[in-house]
Image (cartoon, helix red, strand yellow):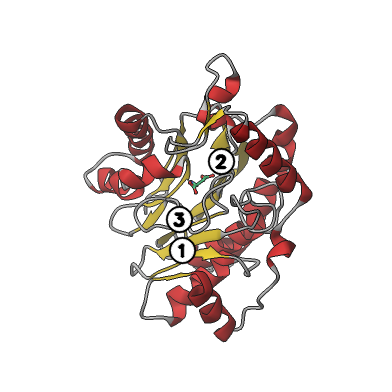
Amino acid sequence: MNTPPVLLIHGGAWAMPDDAVEAHKAGIAAALAAGYALLERGASALDAVEAAVTVMEDDEAFDAGRGSFLTRDGRVQLDALLMNGANLRTGGVACVERLKNPIRAARLVLDHSPHVYFVGVGAERFARQHGMALIDNTELIVPRERERLMAFQKAELEGAVDTTFSGPRHLDKEDEDSDPTTHSHDTVGAVALDRSGHIAAGTSTGGTLSKAPGRVGDSSLIGCGCYADDHSAAVSLTGWGEPIMKLVLGKWAVDRVAAGAPPEVAAEAAIDYLYGRLGGHGGIILIDRQGRIGLAHNTPRMAWGLQTANGTQVGVTRNGLR
Ligand code: ASP
């Protein structure tokens, strides 16, 4: 088989300010280049997804790896999932604090464990036993995020943030911050189709700003923020995690493709369902074995990139795709 490869990636969906656009586009372009070079050489979709996500984890612009949001107590806790549509092999890690690239740990779980999912120190120990270095949590923290956490916690003390809600939300409806999409959702993800006609998906995140230690979001939960099955589609999501989890939205979307919906339609339907059912915000990317793609978001912007045999596109709204 010599299927033309396709790589579709995202770097979060939110009300990204103008001054963040170029950094996101550059990060997306670098991730596309790394992943697509592998696909062109005949590597698996799984390898390409892992490579693309690794580049974005290493890029401080995104909420994944170094540069992630901080937890309420000022630490970085990372979640990631990788899934191979060819055989449904899956690896996930959550609440890891000492791994530079959680997507690589997810790959080790996928390759070397009969289990699917490891958390916390057990995940770190597994990764170390399989050759990954453990780093100090401070190596994942950037000054920008310390400042962001301080500002957020100050606003909380002043009563300007409603934390009883599923996601942090500012109370003042007149303020643009009343929209939860103004909080950065910079999670990264990738879906790919390889030359052998197989698909894969990966998602990696630092979660949400000032999350409670131990909180796990949708991103690394199988069927929520990530899923891949050659019989349907590969998907990665970003956005406000709790509503996405409650709807098991990744699996919901790929099931629509299995039932005959083109990925473009399934992606739009998933975001409509997220908002219509729970008022959730986010973005989704989808691909099927025919290389058909879907991309949708109900946030003002979503960072994305697409590379096929016909060329490369990078955008911060889906309009660029049409
Ligand atoms: N979905 C992620 C979470 O809730 C956040 C994001 O997409 O940026 O952990």
Q: Position of residue 303 (x, y in %)?
A: 59, 39
Q: What residue type is labelled 1?
A: Leu
Estimate how packed mark 3 is, as few (under 14), some (14 to 19) or many (20 or more) residues with alpha carbons within 10 Å. many
Task: Determine whether, in the image, residue 145 is placed left or right of residue 44.
Answer: right
- Horizontal relation, residue 214 to residue 29: left or right: left
Which tag, 3 or 1, sits closer to the chain's start?
Answer: 1
Between residues 121 and 63, which one lies in front from this camera angle? 121
Q: Residue at x 59, y 52 (%)?
A: 71
Viewer-proximal residue, 263 or 16?
A: 16
- Image coordinates of residue 125 in percent, x first then y, are 54, 80
Question: Nearer the N terminus, badge 2 or badge 3?
Answer: 2
Mark 2: C-beta under 8 Å from nearest atom of ligand 1: yes
Q: Is residue 120 left or right of residue 52?
A: left
Vertical side of 165 occupied by 213: above or below: below
Please tell me the numbered disc located at residue 216. Answer: 3
Residue 278 can be seen, yes or no: yes
Mark 1 → mark 2, Cα distance in angstroms: 19 Å
Which mark is on residue 127? Answer: none
- Residue at 45% in and 78% down: 111
Q: Which of marks 2 and 3 is in front?
A: 3
Q: Disc 3 beta carbon < 8 A from ligand 1?
A: yes
- Looking at the image, the residue that sits furthest to the top is 174
Residue indicated by mark 2: 185
Q: Is residue 170 above or below residue 5?
A: above
Image location (x, y in percent) of residue 192: 48, 55
- Name the residue: 21% across, 45% down: 259
